[in-house]
Amino acid sequence: MGGAGMAHRVLIVDDHKMVCEGLKAILERSNEFPVAGEVADGQTAIQFCRTTLPDIVLMDIELGGLTGVEVIKQLVRQFPEIKVVILSVHSDDETVLASMRAGARAFLVKKASSSDLLDALRTVARGGSYIGAHVSDRLLVRIQRGDLEIKPPAILEGLTPREIQVLRLITEGKSTKEAAVLLGLSVETVRSYRKNLMRKLGVKNVAGLFNIAIAAKLTGGKASGGSAMMESVGSSEQKSD
């Protein structure tokens, strides 16, 4: 781990190769933040940190598998010395607040400049927190009026955070067994969550859950090739029962 006057090693977590390459180039040019590694999803990031402990995890909030917020929580719980910095295309208040409450030390949007990114990393490395200028003014207004409640999309009201996690994994095409492994639950527990989701949302199959997740933007816009994903989801449901 980097101490005062030492370089701070950074793990980059993003599922877009070009983004990773761009971030790596910025960090390497700075001579302050050597890149410890690059991974594409949260579960791999957690496994990486178990063997190679970086000082900072620089990650997107939209990742496949575990949600970005869940990844932050696990990183902070398992590796309290690691500082998490979020770099995301999303700048809505709910995403920012959820990330910071989960334990992230900084939040920037991807349209921020490289100097903004380095400023955030330096601030976090010194033990501070940082919110990019693109979101800080708007959040300040909400803080001043006391409106900081994080509300899920209306269509998902009534679901627990765990049910939302399960719903997201199902709509990403994960089988019941895969979802159980990612969430650290038993297969039977995941099946129970799935049945509860269908009952609460008033649908009869996984295709119905998928449609609701799309309407609620739960998939984060990563459902390109939606018909293929629908087939994957349907086959996963059949295989896991």
Image (spheres, rainbow, N blue to C red):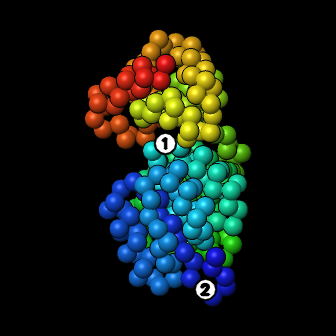
Res 5 → quadrant? bottom right
Q: Give the answer, above or below, for where 52 lies relative to 221.
A: below
Judging depth in this view, the residue of 232 and 92 nearest the camera is 232
Q: Give the answer, above or below, for where 35 lies relative to 211.
A: below
Tag 1: residue type? Gly
Judging depth in this view, the residue of 180 and 77 nearest the camera is 180
Quick one: label 2 or label 1, which is nearer the N terminus? Answer: 2
Give the image location of residue 126, x and y in percent: 66, 77
Give the image location of residue 43, x and y in percent: 53, 50
Q: Which residue, given by chain and number where applicable, does mark 2 sit on? A: 6
**Relative horizontal placement of residue 192, taking residue 229 as reference (left or right):** right
Please report the residue visible at 38 percent of the width from the left and 22 percent of the height from the top.
Answer: 234
Question: Which quadrant is the N terminus positioned in?
Answer: bottom right
Q: Secondary structure at mark 1?
A: loop
Q: Which residue, given by chain and number where applicable, does mark 1 sit on? A: 65
Q: Give the answer, above or below, for where 28 lies relative to 14.
A: below
Label 1 neighbour load within 10 Å: few <14, some 14-19, many 20+: many
Tag 2: residue type? Met
Q: Contact, CB < 8 Å: mark 2 with mark 1?
A: no
Give the image location of residue 227, x and y in percent: 28, 28
Judging depth in this view, the residue of 168 and 183 nearest the camera is 183
- Work out whether residue 117 can be spotted: no
Distance, label 2 to label 1, CA atoms, is 34 Å
Please report the residue visible at 30 percent of the width from the left and 38 percent of the height from the top.
Answer: 224
Judging depth in this view, the residue of 221 and 44 nearest the camera is 44
